[in-house]
Image (cartoon, helix red, strand yellow):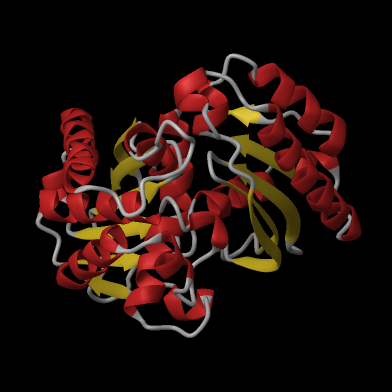
Amino acid sequence: MTATAAAAIDCGTNSIRLLIAEADPATGVLTDLDRRMEIVRLGQGVDRTGRLAPEALDRTFAACRRYADAIRAHGIPPERIRFVATSASRDAENREDFTRGVKEILGTVPEVITGEEEAELSFTGATRELAGRPGIDPPHLVVDIGGGSTEFVLGDGRVRAARSVDIGCVRLTERHLLREDGRIADPPAPEQVAAIAADIDAALDLAARRVPLAEAHTLVGLAGSVTTVAAIALDLPAYDSAAIHHTRVPVARVREITGRLLAATHAERAAIPVMHPGRVDVIGAGALVLLRVMERIGAAEVVVSEHDILDGIAYKAAEGA
């Protein structure tokens, strides 16, 4: 059997990502043909207004046009394209504007999935290649820290329990650090950091009602906040996905980096070599989510994965699911 090429798009609150890959039907291994990410901040203001902002939609549609060109260049048929939209578009009153625009550009209807579906796709993408690796024992707790929400999923080859809670890095930043003049508090005051931490802890209480967090043997962290913390921990001169993938970061290092990010100014965070410009304002909140999770479950380290929901979507697209 020959490999099947498919295209997966993950549109979250902060970023939109594309993966064009070939899936080997015998082994299930994905081979990247094209992997891209753009910060479009689709969720700009959604927590406050309940609607997708026109300028956020414009940025997202522009990225979709670039992705459509790449998909056509690889000859991917429409039935092998899967577009998944997550937290911001779930929350928006005008999500039909988003759906209609994506359909016109890409020829496929975006699936506005539930938080639980999002968690299962993240688990598939992050853990399919971990089986049998020494020191990365199941059950795995996969934590996907997005812009609008964070997904928790526990499993040991299959999903046992999952929960999505509204503590993404963009949502927390806008909720607690956005000033009346529209600018981000820089750096945040101690009481603002404490308010973010309280929100995170309350959300962890909700997650724990459905997901037995303490049963995890391995914590697997996903998405840009986690990979950026890992890149800082590695002291990389530039962002390097291959170097970051499956890095293990001790909790003491996460605590030190989180404190440094929350105490830094915008200019100081922007000067970090691995920092994407679109993450400068929200990385502190994202790092704090990771730290509070680790402290809550007593994790000595986090295994960082560059494979996440996007890879899970690609697996499903290649399978025609």
- Image spot of residue 156 (x, y percent): 28, 51
* 15 on left or right of 265: right
Number of numbered discs overlaid on the protein picture: 0
- Image spot of residue 275 (x, y percent): 49, 68
Residue drawn at (76%, 64%), measured in percent from left and top?
Answer: 2
Decide if residue 130 is in sight here: no
Whether 134 is drawn above or below 41: the answer is: below
* 66 on left or right of 59: right
Residue drawn at (64%, 20%), measured in percent from left and top?
Answer: 95
- Image spot of residue 299 (x, y percent): 14, 60
Residue 252, located in which quarter of the rendered image? bottom left
The N terminus - image quarter: bottom right
Q: Nearer the viewer, residue 224 or 264?
A: 264
Q: Nearer the viewer, residue 133 or 67?
A: 67
Residue drawn at (35%, 67%), measured in percent from left and top?
Answer: 229
Q: Nearer the viewer, residue 231 or 171?
A: 171
* 92 on left or right of 25: left
Residue drawn at (52%, 80%), measured in percent from left and top?
Answer: 238
The C terminus - image quarter: top right
- Image spot of residue 175 (x, y percent): 36, 32
Residue occupying the far top of the picture: 93
Whether 99 is drawn above or below 266: the answer is: above
Decide if residue 267 is in sight here: yes
Residue occupying the far front of the picture: 181
